[in-house]
Image: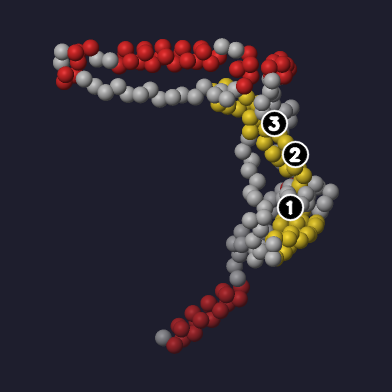
Amino acid sequence: MVAHHVQYGRTFLWGSGRICDDSVDQVRHVQEPFYGLATVIKWFFSHMLMFLLEFNFCGLWHSDYVVDAHKAKKVDALQPCDTEYPGFMYDSSIRETNSLIKCGRCQKMFVVQAVPESNLVLMVVQADCDCSRQYSSITLEPKEVKYNASVKCNRMKSQKVRRRPNSCHAYHPKEDAKDCGGASEISLSVALFLASLATSLALCRWT
């Protein structure tokens, strides 16, 4: 349905509240020309400090106190970032449609019908035709959006604090749930009662 643009159209959504890895941040490299040199110096002094802290001077005259130094775990630097991920808009003007998808030697038929008074879609698909080799799965994993220095600075200035909506629409009168059938009601079956009464009277007479 997505590949053939039937009832669903692809769009892109953006999010600004995620945390991304800063190890491949190109904007930071542009703003700081000596970032590579500073990283090497920082790495050298941090490892030298860890060596001095973990080194046991008692081992120079007492070998029993010699311990192996543990390598410090590498922690990736994280920073706030903007992400982009695909979304799909439902075309509410199409109430019912059907189509055929060619999948090599077979054809896969599907029927789509919108459920009245709701945002649900009923879909019936022919299951004996496999299309997984021709159409790959669609991933919704967000991807980091890269900006240059000027665009990133302008976006940080123009960002606004998010606020809650003025009202909450969590209920619609046409979506009221109603009990269907008689399974939820407890009632006496007259026919079953009369049959049980007749059986009891017959057994009493025979005994």
Residue at 60% across, 17% down: 29
Q: For the residue carrying disc 1, how many other residues have a C-alpha within 10 Å: few (<14), some (14-19), or many (20+)?
A: few
The residue under label 2 is: 11
The residue at the point 37 percent across, 13 percent down is 48
The residue type indicated by label 2 comes to Thr
Quadrant including the C terminus: bottom left
Q: Residue, x 66% and y 26% (percent of image)?
A: 146
Q: CA distance from mark 2 to mark 1?
A: 14 Å
Say which mark, if any, is on residue 14. 3
Q: Residues within 10 Å of mark 3 (few under 14, many from 20)?
A: some
Q: Inspect this view and state whether residue 108 appears.
A: no
User: Is label 2 in a helix, a strand or a loop?
Assistant: strand
The answer to whether one can see residue 189 in this image is yes
Q: Residue beneath label 1, please?
A: 1
The residue located at (70%, 60%) in the rendering is 103
Give yes or no for contact between labels 2 and 1 (Cβ–Cβ under 8 Å). no
What type is the residue that disc 3 sits on?
Trp
x and y percentages locating residue 61 in the rendered image: 15, 13
Q: In front: 13, or 151? A: 151
Element type at mark 1: loop
Describe residue 188's horizontal placement relative to residue 73 as left or right: right
